[in-house]
Image: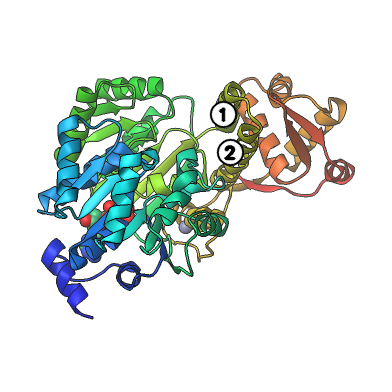
Amino acid sequence: MDSLEAALHKHFGWRDFRAGQRPVVEAVLEGRDALAVLPTGGGKSLCYQLPALVRQGLVVVISPLVALMEDQVLQLQRRGIAAACLHAGLDAVRRQQAFAHLRDETLRLLYLAPERLQGEATQRMLENHAESGHLVALAVDEAHCISAWGHDFRPDYRRLGLIRRLCPGVPMLALSATAAPRVRADIIRLLALRSPLVQVSSARRDNLHYAMQRRPRDPMPQVLEALTLSQGASLIYARTRRSVERWAERLQEQNVDATPYHAGLDPETRQLALTRFLEQKRPVLVATVAFGMGVDRGDVRLVLHLDLPATPEGYLQESGRAGRDGLPAHCLVLFSPGDRTSLGWAMQASARKKGSNDEQRRLDLAQQQLRRMEAVAEGEICREQALLLAVGELVDPCGRCDRCCGPVQRRDWSTQAETLLSHLHDLDGTDMRRLGEHLALKEPGRGDRWTWLARRLVQEELISESNDGVQRLYLRESGRRFLDAPWPLDYAA
Ligand code: ADP
Ligand code: ZN
């Protein structure tokens, strides 16, 4: 079947498939369902675009983000491929254009927001195209959004089982960048995929250099150093809109041409920020993490997080935006021991507002993920290994990250641990902050260090924590044993 390579070259100008692409394209062309897990930048979109072109039919793509759809439609149109999208924000002219192309069967790719599937007109359109044999495949992009175990659950995705019923004979292709085994199982079950080809490519990225460092009170020197090192397009992620604005301003004061980007900006300003990011030589974009799913700039040299990311899956996806051209790129996380607490509180507040049982379950999951991410950051093993382990893939150490390369400075913390644990012995059930303050009285300015150590001892299972809004700490049986006869605790710090 080298006609597939010919088609790849004809429509996209590329000579070879990337790892995992060909089997997926073949499956779709054979009419078989498939689940493709390819890393960010691995070329997922080609897996559904090429079948539409080879068959000269229509592929319908369900996509969770309007920005992502618009971006893909633009890129396809630039290649002379007929593509359109349907979402709530579309004006009447473009909607009618899309339907006209659908009617005369010239459209190759149609991107749909999941909620569009509730509409009668869309449902009938799908049924008709399926019956006429014109519909080549249904693709569900970012398919992990269907799973509550995933890092980006979207209730709208739960209804996607419906399209299987609308077009029973059409092959379905689910795609995701990171899907742990549990999430994969959810995707297959909830989309009712029939003996699908499951193509999982390693999430390893041989050109990314991961580093995670404790964030000092003012991390400006670290940020400037990272920008100087990267010498290229850089993405800086901050957690809130306010800190995005503030960081962009502060960087401008340092003569860095930084542009803020978040969902609160008006559309024009946002468009301008994006254009600058795509067109300038060494742009620096400061953004909230929601940004960037669809940004196709291959030569991003630095992705810097100013806070602890919320989940390992999410972080892999965000950091994966670096170095999609295959050349070396850096991914730096600056985190502080307080990040998990403040992120946890933000999650709790939003769960309380929504108030359902489901919300509570999701909150528990989110906090569990946050703890996993913190364990990667505080941990002593290879960053890539730890991140991939968290999403269910076992690999060797990468040989490039700060843990693999840097000398890890270790020291024995057992004396401090003894002090902390005996405090807890007297004040069982005290909260993290109060314990930190209490101990810091002895060592002014070192409160942070004590909360850090408390977290390590939670990971070490010498103390346990409850999370009822305040983080209460309790001495565990093993903690008591430690107090009776301490043993060495070697930590990097
Ligand atoms: P993903 O959605 O998996 O993150 P994309 O589909 O956006 O990745 O593809 C990432 C980049 O790789 C894009 O710039 C795309 O044009 C390019 N690409 C995809 N497949 C190939 C290929 N076979 N050869 C060369 N470049 C490719
Ligand atoms: Zn490593």
Q: Which amino acid does label 1 sit on?
A: Met
Q: Can residue 444 be seen in this view?
A: yes
Q: In this view, does 417 lie to the left or right of 411?
A: right
The location of residue 217, given as percent across then percent down, is 48, 25
Residue 440 versus residue 215 in the image, above or below: above
Residue that carries the numbered disc 2 in the rendered image? 366
What x and y, as percent, mark residue 345?
59, 25
The image position of residue 160, as x and y in percent, is: 44, 48
- The residue located at (54%, 64%) in the rendering is 394
Residue 42 appears in the picture as rendered = no
Q: What residue do we see at 35% from left, 46% from top?
A: 123
Q: Earlier in the sequence, mark 1 or mark 2?
A: 1
The correct choice, above or below, for 468 with respect to 390 in the image is above
Disc 1 beta carbon < 8 A from ligand 1?
no
Whether tag 1 and tag 2 are in contact, CB under 8 A, the answer is yes
Crowd tier of the residue under label 2, counting other residues whose Cα lies within 10 Å: few below 14, some 14–19, many 20 or above: many
Q: Is residue 489 above or below residue 468?
A: below
The dot on residue 478 is: none
Residue type indicated by callout 2: Ala
Q: Quadrant of the N terminus?
A: bottom left
Q: Is mark 1 on a helix, strand or loop?
A: helix
Residue where numbered disc 1 is placed? 347
The single residue placed furthest to the right in the displayed view is 484
